[in-house]
Image: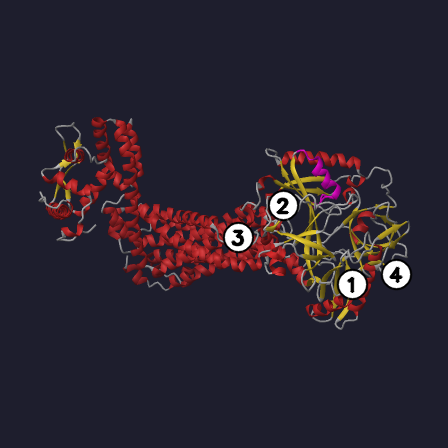
Amino acid sequence: MARKANPDPQELLPLPSALFHILVALADRERHGYGIMQDIAARTDQKMRLSPGTLYGSIKRMLAQGLIEESEERPDPDLDDERRRYYRITDFGRRVAAAETERLSKLVSQAVASLLPGSRPV
Amino acid sequence: MSDRFYRLLLLLCPGEFRDEYGSEMARLFRDRCRREGTLRVLLEALPDLAIAAVREHMETLWKDLRYCVRLMRKSPGFVAVAVTTIGLGIGANTAIFSIVNAVMLRPLPYSDPERLVGIWGIPPSRAGQSFLSPASFLDCKNQGHVLEQTEGLEYETINLIASAEPVRVGGARVSAGIFSLLGVPPLLGRTFLADDDRDGAAPVAMLSYRLWQQQFGSDPQAVGRSVTLNGRVHTVIGITPPILQYPLNGPEVWTPLAMSAKESQVRHTSNFQVFARLKPGVSAAQAQAELTAMARRDERLYPQYVNWSAKVILLNDQMVADVRKGLLVLFGAVGLVLLTACSNIGNLLLARATVRRREIAMRTALGASRSRLVRQLLTESVVLASIGGAAGLVLAKWALKALVLVIPPSVLVRSRGELDIDVHVMAFTLAASLLAALVFGLAPALRTSKLDLNASLKEAGRSAGTGSRDRRLRNALVTSEVALSFLLLIGASLLMLSFWRLQNVSPGFRTEKLLTFRVALPESKYKDQLVPTGDTFVWSDRQVPTFYDELLERLRSLPGVNAAAASGYAPFTSENNSATFETEEARYMEGKTPPRDVPMAFFRPISPNYFRTLGIPLLRGRELTARDNEYSPPVAVINEMMARRFWPGQNPIGRRFRTSTKFPWRTIVGVVGDVKYRGLGVAAIPEMYFSYPQALWPQHAMTVVLRTSGDPANLAAAARREVLAIDPDLPIYDVRTMEDLVYRSLAGPRFNMLMLEIFAGFALVLAAVGIYGVIGYSVTQRTHELGLRMAMGAQARDVIKLVLREAMILTSIGLAAGLVAALVATRLLSSLLFAVRPTDPGVFVAVSVLLTAVALLASYIPARRATRVDPINALRCE
C-alpha cells in the first residue's frame, strides 16, 4: 500500500483504543508482542489484555500506516531462548500518539468542565 | 496440546496473514497460557481469533474486489462477453430450474402430503391405470387396514345457472371427507358434512375460487345463495381455496357424493378417483401389498375383476410421474449448456492470462504467494459469475413469461400456477453461479499463478507464456466444448426427428376443416333410460337421441357445413371408455372361468355419418346409419385392430359379440381403419363403434364434429345458435378445430424439442466461438513458424491447410468424446422418442458433419489471417 510522503496525523484520529495503547506501550522502548500485551495489562490494572488476533491485526495495520516498524529479531532475556519479533514506534507514530493525547485531554477538560464544575482539570 | 489446537485454528485466517504473524500469535498465546492458565486464555482467544479471521478475510476480499473492478474497467469488452455468456447459461438454468422447482420440488400444499396416496385400478391390458368402481372405492374405505382415511370423487360436467347465461363447468361429486383428508379448510362457509353425503339429503354445493370470482364477483354473500346445477337447485355452502387444482382435476363445482344403495353396488364402471391417507408409519409398499391382496380376493368374487390389479401411488410421485422424465432431460441438457459456457469463459480467462502475465509476475516478485494469487484470480471469476448470475436471474424472469406460452398444459397444471422465481430458485442461481465461477476459474487460476518468474519478466509484453501446458489446457477446453455441443445437438436432432415423424403419423382420418365442440344434456332434464330387452333396446323417453338427431339435422343444413356427426368420445381428447366383451366363438360370461386375457375394446357411441364426416376409411361392410336404432337388431362397426386381434385371418362381418349378459348380441356389419384416438404417438387399440340409440347407456354428453368447406372456426357461432334454438339453457363448450386438438396433443414433445434446439444452438455458437478463439490464438503464437514456412516457399494454401488441420484434430477429438458420451446419454432420451432409435446413425452422421463444417468455418478466418503474415516481419520480431 503506498503511503503519502508527509502524512497528517490528524487523518488517523480518533485512534482506536487498541492502537493508542500499543503506541503508548512502545513509547519508551522496543517490545515484542507479549511485551506489549503485558505492558498494556499493567497500565490498565489488568483490565485490558489483548488477545493474539487483536494484537497482531492491529500491528499489521500500524505497520501499513507507518505508525510502528519492525526492529531486528532477538530472544527476550527474561523469557526463553526463542527469537521474537520486536517493534518500535516511528516518528510519525509518535506524532500521531501526541495528537491523540492532545485530543483526549481536550475531551477530558471539556468533560470535567461540564460534569464536575468547580474542580480543575488534572 | 492447546498450542497445537490454536495453530490449527490459525488456518481460519488468510494465508498471507498467517504466514506473517501465525507463529508470533501462537507464541503469544503460549506465553499467556503459561502465566494465566490455559482455559481462561483459550476462552478469550477463540472469539478473538474468529473476529480477526473474519476481519482479515474481509480486508483481503475488499482489496481483491477493488483491484478486480479496476481491472474490469480496463477491459469492458472481455467483461461484456464473459457476462453475456455466463448470464445466458445461468439464465437458461434458472428458468428450467424454476419449472423443476414448481413441478417437482415444491411439496403439495396439503397437510402431511407424504402420507397421501392415490389408489388406482390396473386393467387386464396393463395399459395405463383406471379409476375405481363405486363398490371398490367403498371396499377400500371400509376394509383398508393400513389406510387412515379414504375418500373418492367422480368428475362430471355441469350446466350451471348462477346468473343469466347458462355455463358449462367441470364439477365433482366428492365424498364428504375429502377436504379433511387433504387438510384444506374452506375459503368461506363450510365443507360437506356426513349428513350432506346421504342419499336424499338437501342438495348443497361448494364453488371453486375461480367460479366464485367469475360468477359472483367474489361476493362473500354468495354463500347461502342458490344455483342451478344440471337443472336442480342447490344451496351454496362454501367456497374452496384455489390450491385444490391438483391432484383434483380442477373442478369448479363440488357436490356431495350421496351415493344411492344401488350405486354403491356398481362394479362394472370405473368412475371414482380415490385418494387415501396412510396410517402413520405405514409405507406405500405396505398399502400396495394390502390392496394387491384385496384385488386377488375380488378376482375370485367378481368375474368382471379377473386380471385386474390395484396400484398405490404416493401423491407426490403421481403428480410428476408423466412429466418427470422430460423435465430431467431438459435440466440435464441445460446443465451441459452451462458447462459449455464455462469452458468458453475458461478459455477467455486463459487468453487474458497471457496478457496479464507481466502483472502476475510483478505481484509474485513483490511477495504474493501462489495461494494469494489463486485467491485473487478466483475472486475475479466469482465477480464475473455473480454479475452473470444477476443478469441470468433477470433473463430467467423474462424467459418464464415466454415459456408459459409453450409449456405443455400437463406441466403447467402441476406447477399450480406458481411458476416463478422464489427463494429456492434464487439459492439455486447463487449456487450455480459460484459453481460456475469455480469451474471456469479454477483451472486458469492455477495455471496462471504458476509461472516461471524469470522468463515471464524477461519476455513480458511479447507473446510470452506459450507453454505447452497452457496450450494443452486451452485445447482440452475447446475439445470439451465440441463434445458438449455434439451431445446437445444429438439430443436436439433426435427430438426433432422424432417430432417430425410423430407429426407425420396419419391419425387415421382427415384433420383439416373440422370443427368440434361438446354438448352435455343435463340428466335432470333429459331423463332418459336405455334398457336392453332381450334382442333390442327400449328408451324410456327417447329425449337424448331425439335431441342429437335434430341438432345434427340443423347443423347439416348450415351453409358451409359439408357433413356433421357426433361421437361420445372424440379423437385427441382424454375422453375414452372401454368395455370387456365375449365373442360368440369364445364365450365365458355365463359361468365359465374367464380367459387370462379378457377381450376388451374401447367403445365409441356414434351418430350416422360419423366415418364419412371424419374421413375414416370403411374397409369392409357398411357404415352405421339412422336405421340402426333401438328397433333394429344391434350392430357394431369395429376397427381393423379389433378385427385382426379377435378374428385373425377371418372375415369378421356377420360375427357376433356382447359386452355383458344383460346386453343383446351385436352383429359386426363393418370394419373401419384404425384411428389414433389417444394421440399420434400411441398405438391403435381395438375399438368398437355403436350406433348411439343402441349404445350401452344414454349418451348425454357428445362431441359434435362438423366438416366445413371454409375455415371451421367461423362456424362456432352458428353452431352455438343452433344448440340454443333447441334448448336455450344449453351451453356448448370445448369448441376447437381438429387441427388445434392435434397441435395441442403434441405440446409435450414440441416443448422438449424447442428447448433442446435452443440449448444446442447456443452450445454450437459457443463451440464455434471457442474454436475461433483457440485457433486464432494459435495462429498468433505460430507467427514466427508460419513466417519461416512462407519464407521457405510455402503457399497460402499450405498455410491454410496447416491451420485447418489443427482445428480438425481438436474437432475430431471432441467429436469422438461426444460420440462416446452420446451413446450413453441418449439412452435416457429413448422414452421421449417416437419411431427413432437413440443411436440413429443418420442423426449422428448429420450432426458430425454440421459440427465439422462449423469448426472449419470458425477456424477459416484465423487461417486466412495466417496467410497474410509477412515473412520478414514475422522473422524480425523474434
Residue ID for mark 4: B627
Label 2 SS: helix
User: Quick check: is B373 in the magenta stretch?
Assistant: no
Q: CA distance from mark 2 to mark 1?
A: 41 Å
Q: How many C-alpha atoms fall within 10 Å of the one at disc 3: few (<14), some, or many (≥20)?
A: many
Q: CA distance from mark 3 to mark 2?
A: 46 Å
Q: Earlier in the sequence, mark 2 or mark 4?
A: 2
Residue ID for mark 3: B488
Residue ID for mark 1: B565
The residue closer to the viewer here, B859 or A115, is A115
Residue ID for mark 2: B179
Q: Earlier in the sequence, mark 3 or mark 4?
A: 3
Please state the horizontal and vertical placement of residue B761, each as a whole percent of the image. Answer: 51, 58
Please state the horizontal and vertical placement of residue B191, each as a whole percent of the image. Answer: 64, 47
Q: How many C-alpha atoms fall within 10 Å of the one at disc 2: few (<14), some, or many (≥20)?
A: some
Furthest-bottom residue in view?
A: B559
Do the dots labelled 1 and 3 sit on one chain? yes
Please name the amino acid that badge 3 sits on: Leu
Compared with A63, B354 (above or below) is below
Q: Earlier in the sequence, mark 4 or mark 1?
A: 1
